[in-house]
Image (cartoon, helix red, strand yellow):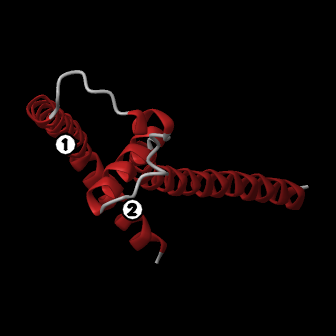
Amino acid sequence: MKLKILNVLTVSMVTLAILAPGIIVFNLVWGRHIELVKTQNLSCQVTNINQGSEPLSLQPKSINTLQSPVYKKLSPHNFFVTLKIIVQQYKIVAILQWIVLSIPILIGFGVIAYDRYLIYRAAVFKAQVEMLERLWEHSIEQ
């Protein structure tokens, strides 16, 4: 049973080691894609503002009200934008990536270290048994 668990963990560690560079590259490409989408959205917003706004018109209503996302009515689009901003602020995705990558590695190292410890204890026990057998033979000879 223990050997099967060790084999499964070894295969999962090797698989993770093979897939880790791909995951990192995908993360980098996805980050660049998100930046490109943000840039395109900002570009569209700038063109919409320039086409639809009057030159230098002051709106006293916007001065007196708070411009916080909490006080605005959130449409589904604004909700997801706000959620994405919160996720980016706290770097939850980065933390989850490190957890997902590090937990199997730590479990694998733990199993390997425990296996090495058991081998070490067996060697120490064998040495002690041999020493006791030599002492016993020595006491019989006398």
Q: Name the residue at 25% across, 40% down.
A: 24
Q: Residue 43, position in %: x, y? A: 12, 31
In the image: residue 100, left or right of residue 77 = right
State yes or no: discs 1 and 2 in contact (Cβ < 8 Å): no
| In the foreground, 18 or 131 | 18
Observer-side mark, 1 or 2, equals 1
| Position of residue 66 measured from the top left corner of the image (x, y, whole percent) | 50, 40
Q: Amino acid at mark 2?
A: Leu
Q: Rounded to the nearest whole Å, what is the CA distance between mark 1 and mark 2?
A: 29 Å
The amino acid type of the residue labelled 1 equals Trp
Asked whether the viewer can see residue 98, the reply is no
- Asked if residue 30 is positioned above or below residue 47 in the image, the reply reads below
Q: In the rendered image, which quarter is residue 140 located in?
A: bottom right
Q: Which mark is residue 19?
A: none
**Residue 123: horizontal and vertical position, in percent?**
63, 52
> Badge 1 is on which residue?
30
Residue 70 is situated, as x and y percent measured from the top left of the image, at 49, 51
- Give the number of callouts: 2
Of 88 and 105, nearer the camera is 88
Q: Residue at x 61, y 52 (%)?
A: 117
Disc 2: CA contacts within 10 A as few (<14), some (14-19) or many (>=20) = some
Find numbered disc 1 in the image and state the secondary structure of the residue it sits on: helix
Q: Kindly identify the residue that appears in the image at 26 percent across and 26 percent down.
A: 57
Does residue 84 appear to the left or right of 41 in the view shown?
right
Label 2, secondary structure: give it. helix
Which residue in the protein does label 2 denote?
Answer: 9
Report the front residue among 17 and 93.
Answer: 93
Few, some or many residues within 10 Å of mark 1 (<14, 14–19, 20+)? few
